[in-house]
Image (cartoon, rainbow, N blue to C red):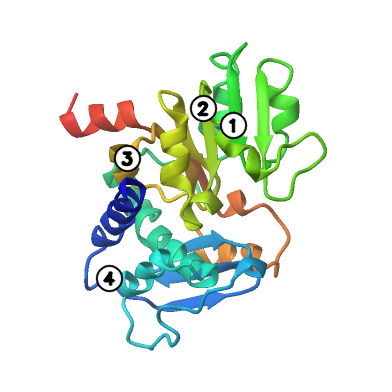
Amino acid sequence: MKGEKVLKSMYEALIDGIPDDAPLDEVISTHYGAIAFSNGNIGLSEFRDEFDTRPMMNSSYKPDMTLKELAKGIMSWNFTEAAMGVAALNAYYNSPAMAEKNGLHLSRSLYAEDRNADPFITYQNEAKGKKVVILGHFPYIEQLLKPICNLYIIDRFPWKGDYPETAIEYIVPDSDYVFIGVLYFLEKSLPHIIDLAGDAFVGLVGPATVMSPIFFDYGVDELDGFIPKDSNLAARIFKEQENGKIYSAGEKVSLRKKDYEKFISGK
């Protein structure tokens, strides 16, 4: 089937981009997410463990496992294992060195709160009067977008005023902007949602967004994510061992397809 081929090629391309010898220093899986460490870098992923119904593809993780081997977990229909795969992808693609290699200009300070990297702020003018669909209920989006556009929020656990996920097939088509949280990538529905979006502007949003330009080959127009700069602080906050927002351990970033294409062409 076409959808299965796109799913396989997108996910395999992301896995293949990781060097074979990239080390996996540690992986931690909890009921709310996964963390992977590699060469001093950290990768994060959230997930919903209550929906696990399938066994893991690789039930035992060995001490000598590589980062690439862990990343293959993204292909799994066991979402705990898939979350570890996303964390592995992030440990590579969301490292500061790889981010700068892909054209992102990072601040030299540990913490940089950049409003220009928040799509729900930067697209306020462009989205006026447009149909905007957001998959995943993000903080403050009603206050930022509802007064200026036709806003539709879809979530598996809908808040008051949200739409359930069964509405995706009906609401996403004919949109002007579609912003998608990482869980839809992890759970393998991303290629189908991109297909439904048609000519809409598609962005992947959230701190666990995999900041890889590979997505631009599969219908994504922008990546809005997070580059950890203090791995230990990010891990403590993610594990709720320390109070604070995850963004205080690094930098919020945004990469548009058109900007990346200019960067690689040298213009």
10 Å crowding of disc 1: few (<14), some (14-19), many (20+): few
- The amino acid beneath tag 1 is Tyr
10 Å crowding of disc 3: few (<14), some (14-19), many (20+): some
Of residue 4 and residue 20, the one placed in the foreground of this image is 4
Tell me which label, 2 or 3, sits earlier in the chain: 2
Tell me which label, 3 or 1, sits earlier in the chain: 1
Residue annotated with mark 4: 22
**On residue 266, which mark appears?**
none
User: Does residue 170 appear to the left or right of 217 in the view shown?
Assistant: right
- The amino acid beneath tag 4 is Ala
Separation (CA) of disc 2 from disc 3: 17 Å
Q: Position of residue 162 (x, y in %)?
A: 74, 37
- Residue 229 visible, this orientation: no
Mark 2 in CB contact with mark 3 (< 8 angstroms): no
Q: Residue furthest top?
A: 129
User: Does residue 112 appear to the left or right of 215 in the view shown?
Assistant: right
Residue annotated with mark 2: 173
Q: From the viewer's perspective, is the residue at label 4 or at label 2 nearer? A: 2
User: Does residue 48 appear to the left or right of 122 in the view shown?
Assistant: right
Of residue 84 and residue 108, the one placed in the foreground of this image is 84
Separation (CA) of disc 4 from disc 2: 40 Å
**On residue 170, which mark appears?**
1
Tell me which label, 4 or 3, sits earlier in the chain: 4
Q: Is mark 3 on a helix, strand or loop?
A: helix
The C terminus, quarter of image: top left
- The amino acid beneath tag 3 is Tyr
Q: From the viewer's perspective, is the residue at label 3 or at label 1 nearer? A: 1
Separation (CA) of disc 3 from disc 1: 22 Å
Residue annotated with mark 3: 218
Mark 3 in CB contact with mark 1 (< 8 angstroms): no
Tell me which label, 4 or 1, sits earlier in the chain: 4
- The amino acid beneath tag 2 is Pro
